[in-house]
Amino acid sequence: MATTTTTAAASHFFGTRIHGAVVKQRSGKFQARFSFGKKKSPPAKKARPTRDSDRLVWFPGATPPEWLDGTMVGDRGFDPLGLGKPTEYLQYDFDSLDQNLAKNDVGELLGVITDSGELQPTPLQPYTEVFGLQRFRECELIHGRWAMLGTLGAIAVEALTGVAWQDAGKVELVEGSSYLGQPLPFSLTTLIWIEVIVIGYIEYQRNAELDPVKRLYPGGYFDPLGLASDPGKLENLQLAEIKHARLAMVAFLIFGIQAAFTGKGPISFVATFNQ
């Protein structure tokens, strides 16, 4: 019988499917099943020519994991739960199911499937591995950008209107939609539909981009001043952005805890801190 292997593995936990994966082939039947195997370290990358002792890490004396080798901008070796560790999938032959035998043989290991890391032209989820390191970086950067906008917005709204960010929705439900105290010619329901349609379209277009770099740094309209046009400053700008993004995520988490326990916005809390 011809030796064939399949190139798709399904995750029973998250419903993801890997297509076009790299398979280490071994002889066996064409029928196969999959199960999760152990995780292994990724192939060696071209690391920066810096000594381990000179590398900045998230905590003094911390040892970064193998898969965080410092090649990404802002990589400080922080992955205490090992979520970014690359995964391999084991491909097994079917167990023997002959009812006339006293003992059936267990299916042999046919090969190992590893994620190719390539993006697929799917409209909502182009990544073949939901726990891939590149996807984690994209999520971190996008969440950080939203956090920077949210942190600035929470402070600006309270400074200009006197209404804390967590109470802004209550005011609009009573007084109607407004922006910085100025009424808007739309109802709150209309504004929600506008936001859903606009953001949905933007996300659809963003996931249509298959270049990993452009997904993170699209440039163009998102760089109106052309700050990233200088290759010598690009990495410094990327490092500054990821640092500010991480700080903003921590800041907004503090805003949320503060609002939950005190009911105050960031400005009113600081103003009455010693009272």
Image: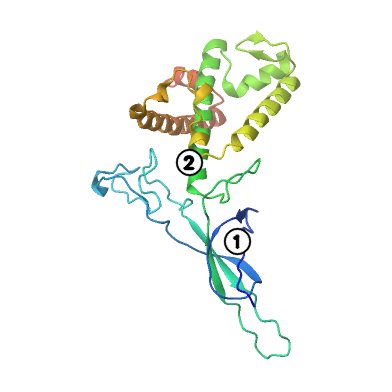
Q: What residue type is labelled 2?
A: Arg
Q: Residue furthest top?
A: 182
Q: Split into 4 quadrants, where in the image is the N terminus? A: bottom right
Q: Residue 206 carries which label?
A: none
Q: Name the residue under label 1.
A: 7
Could you tell me which secondary element the residue under label 1 belongs to? Answer: loop
Between the residue at mark 1 and the residue at mark 2, the CA separation in whole angstroms equals 26 Å
Q: In screen coordinates, is 237 left or right of 20? A: left
The residue closer to the viewer here, 182 or 90, is: 90
| Residue under pointer 2 | 137
Residue 67 in percent (x, y) is at 40, 52
Examine the image and state in which quarter residue 170 appears.
top right
Locate residue 68, reporting x and y percent. 39, 49
SS for dot 2:
helix
Query: Which amino acid is tagged 1?
Result: Thr
Determine the image quadrant of residue 3. bottom right
Residue 47 visible in image: yes
In the figure, 110 relative to 249: above or below?
A: below
